Image (spheres, helix red, strand yellow):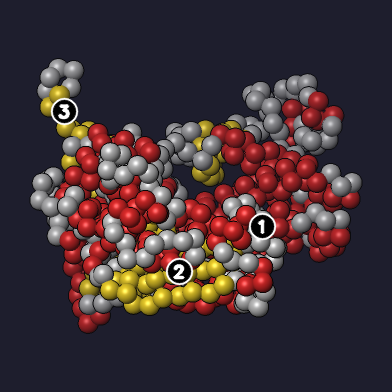
Amino acid sequence: MAPPSPEQPSFDELGTHLSQVTFCVVDLETTGGGKESCITEIGAVKVCGGEILGEFQTLVRPTTPIPPMIQVLTGITNQMVAGAPDLADALPRFATFSAGCVMVAHNAPFDIGFLRRGHEELHITWPRPRVVDTVALARQVLPSDEVRNCKLSTLSAHFNATTIPNHRALSDARATVDVLHGLLERVGGLGVHTLEDLSEMTAQVSPDRRAKRGWAATAPEGPGVYWFEHTGPDADSRLRTEVLYVGKSINLRRRLRNYFSAAEKRSRIHEMVRVATGVQFLECATSLEAEVRELRMIASHAPRYNRRSRKQNRLVWLKLTKEAFPRLSAVRRIADEEARHWGPFSSMDAALEAAMVLQEAFRLRQCTTRLSPRTASADCALSEMGRCSAPCLLGEGVAEHAQAVKEVRRAWDEDARGVLRSAQPRLAKLIAAQRYEEAGVLTSRLKTFHATSVRHHRVRSIAACRQIVGAAPVAGGWEIHVFRYGRLAAASSARTSAVQSVAAETVAAAETVVAPPRGIPAGTWEEAERVATWLELPGVRLLETDGEWAWPLHAGLPAEQLASELLGGDILNHAMDLEFSPLSIEVS
């Protein structure tokens, strides 16, 4: 960890020095300023370190006539552009000329907007270059009593440009080059020496935020977790340190720099950096270790500026109650280890939707009344509607309800297909009647059930293993992780020749993890999911597995099979004929 440091990073550490940046200064002439207007001329000058590297100029044949006023202003007539190349020819040539450059324009939103729209019309990928607007830069640098306005003609005269702008593209681009150099000379005296500094100035990054960029100076260029702090007196005038925000990165130094530059756009993070009195960081052996440490710190400190992962322990489960005629109950914690629990869900609404799917599939009772196995009680409306087996009557419904409970357990433990297939008759009726909104609601519930089934078994499978040791290839060697009951217990990295020995050392130094309750990971569920994602990465090698890392074949289905399983072949074809898109029931 490193305390806040006033030391300023070198120019090399902060970014690209302006003397090494290649700028493409561009100017366009058009038929007007509206969305239907067309480019009539492109002019550009490529410069680096004050030297001109090349020039580009071409007339462009527009698809609409040039208005008389524009002809008078620019001197470009309809006759001049009649034989000129069209945009489909001119724009790719300019794109090649300007490739890899920082784009510069006077009133950049106008010129860059036309170029971007031209790329879209021609289906050419817009390269999203960095852009410097000399108008915006001049307004930042030049006081109002020095120049009366920021027009190109005014600024070119102010900086003694060698070319007088005359509303022709190349001439105006040449004049803009001299204006750019004059402005860069001025900002150099303000401590702006890199492209990143220039971006910050034009984006109006506050000086106090820029001043804190030295906090990133000692951060390593490797994976790790970082946290911003505020230290100040509390209500009792005692110094107290509060963790404001926790994050992780595969390159700590580069990520931390962004917080003090124009790259950071989030308003709440701007406020956080302003409030912060320092930043701390911890280098990690692997990117997964950084992810896990971030989750654990967020769970421990609940930083007020973090939004994601703050509710890792606020999960909802479905429970089969322990009574004569079990029913489904949505609970927020597993208090009874002997009862059957399934999930988790991120919200109560999602849990209740899954419960509804199961109740409709197997006619499981929905009432909350505690029923006696010896004394009959009155049935309810659901029984009369055929949506409940009515075990309360102590007739044939008792055996039917017992079978329904078995089917629910089977759907939870082994095979989700029965639940999906049970909806086929109802979906068929809805689709045939073109009641697509209701069909969409039903398929959404089934998707929730299916996704939860996958999530449930995916994590339970690793939570049941006392230890898994895995290694994954990375540049320069291997990442090694030790997992115990779904929790990351140790992480390290090693050269290829030392994988086995380092893995043995990592296991020996790993955290001791106590076996959790049945089916629950030792850490948070979100951490276990990150672990599962890493284990499923291509190229991961299992060095040791103590336990069975496996889950039922039909507990989840590949996305491409889900629509067919829900609808069945005939129904699926009929749905497509009726324009009920099968995409609406695919798993993302």
Type of amino acid under label 1: Pro
**Looking at the picture, how far across and down is residue 97, in whole percent?**
45, 76
In this view of the protein, can residue 352 be seen by the observer?
yes
Number of the front mark, 3 or 2: 2
x, y (%) of residue 245?
A: 29, 40
Tag 2–tag 1 contact (CB < 8 Å) = no
**Labels 3 & 2 near each other (Cβ < 8 A):** no
Expressed as whole percent of the image width and height from the top left, the position of residue 560 reads: 67, 65
Task: Please report the residue visible at 66 percent of the width from the left and 57 percent of the height from the top.
Answer: 68
For mark 2, give the secondary structure: helix
Q: Residue at x 20, y 34 (%)?
A: 230
The quadrant where residue 148 appears: top left
Q: Residue at x 22, y 82 (%)?
A: 497
Question: Label 1 neighbourhood size at 10 Å, few (<14), some (14-19), many (20+)?
Answer: few
Whether residue 550 is visible, yes or no, is no
- Which residue carries the number 2 mark? 170
- Is 250 located above or below residue 97 in the figure? above
Neighbor class of circle 2 (other Cα within 10 Å; few <14, some 14-19, many 20+) is many
Please tell me whether mark 3 or mark 1 is closer to you in this view: 1
Instruction: Report the Cα–Cα distance between label 3 and label 2.
Output: 57 Å
> How far is mark 2 from mark 1, CA to CA?
21 Å
The first of marks 2 and 1 along the sequence is 1
Badge 2 amino acid: Leu
Farthest right residue in view = 433
User: In this figure, which residue is indicated by the disc labeled 3?
Assistant: 232
Mark 3 vs 1, N-terminal side: 1
Q: Position of residue 6 (x, y in %)?
A: 10, 46
The circle on residue 67 is 1
Query: Which of 237 and 586 lies nearest the eye of the viewer?
Result: 237
